[in-house]
Image: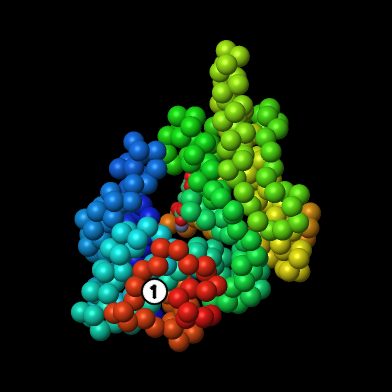
Amino acid sequence: MLVLGIETSCDETSAALVADGKEILSNVIATQLDLHRKYGGVVPEIAARRHAELIGYVVKEALDAGGKALSDVEAIAVTARQGLIGSLLVGVAAAKSLSYALHLPLIGVHHIEAHIFANLLSNPQIPVPHVCLTVSGGHTLLVYVRDYCQYELLGGTLDDAAGEAFDKIAKFLGLGFPGGPVIDRLATNGNREAFRFPRPMLKANNLDFSFSGLKTAIINTFKQSIARGEELPLEDIAASFQEAVVEVLVAKTVRAARRKQASTISVTGGVSANRRLREVFTEACRREGIQVFFPPLSLCTDNAAMIAAAGYARMQKGWRDDLNLDVIPSIPLEVQDGRGN
Ligand code: KG4
Ligand code: ZN
């Protein structure tokens, strides 16, 4: 089945063609980063307007790049849950129009579920059950994937998402947006033990996260060095901050795997591109006898191929939406819209 996936939940306008939930024929991503950079973050109104301008072109380019015509498409999958409401509405309106005009089945997808499928697209051998850590700009979630489309939430962030912490620290340090890739790059030349920043909630006997205190600690350290007239070792701050985030993410995910007696971990979302995170996960999982999977860099951040893959899986389980499909900016993965699992 050839599925056209559409993703507009945040600041990437993306359309993809995926055959049978696994073969990516095209995955076109028009990023809006340049539009938002000067504001140091995504501006929802600007994002929605840009999606509206681009969505038609992006869908056409996905068809062209995949060597297919609209008449070849057999179903439409679109992000309808979790994201900026105006942005989501653009993608869902486009998907509904295509579905209505072409008499094609329509399926609304939860953005986090799609990140889980991003890893499966490139690593089809990932077994279920497994523990999945989704770390992005909007989410830090530990999910037990009992089966595909069957999820149990194990833990999440109580405040900032991990990617949001990277973005906020980078903004504070004047490093630009998005912060994750910049900090990742700077940290390679930094000393990760230069500053001992807090490891929030590492010792708490739960699987939740909190990153706002870490942010405050870094801001205070930065201000104290300025007050002492010291030169700021930006590389060291980046490396030490990244180390604190990585240590907590890895430790809690491994703890979750132990609790669920899972022998596989999957890590997804924009922050899963982080080189130090991959290194520490790989080493910790080797010690624990756990296998760990990451998506290729092209599937870490938001893209429509993962939406098509998740939509295909839902349709295989009999789920369909219709023109009543509405957007929901925030809803837990395991609850969705009462559709159950
Ligand atoms: O998954 P994504 O594209 O969008 C959301 O669903 O939020 O993730 C974007 C986030 C941003 O916060 C960005 O700073 C972070 O992923 N990110 C990284 C890296 N590349 C992107 N964080 C740390 N290290 C990276 N290499
Ligand atoms: Zn995302």
Residue beneath the point at 31% across and 59% down: 86
The three-letter amino acid code for the residue at tag 1 is Gly
Q: Position of residue 167 (x, y in %)?
A: 48, 41
Along the line of sight, the residue nearer the viewer: 83 or 277: 83
In the picture shown, does residue 79 fall above or below 339?
above
Q: Secondary structure at mark 1?
A: strand
In this picture, residue 280 sits left or right of residue 12: right
Q: Position of residue 130 (x, y in %)?
A: 66, 69
Give the labeled residue for mark 1.
108
Q: Quadrant of residue 97?
A: bottom left
In this picture, residue 87 sits left or right of residue 238: left
In this picture, residue 320 sits left or right of residue 151: left
Scheme of colours in the image: rainbow
In the picture shown, does residue 305 fall above or below 164?
below
Residue beneath the point at 60% across and 21% down: 224
Callout 1: CB less than 8 Å from ligand 2: no
Along the line of sight, the residue nearer the viewer: 41 or 148: 41
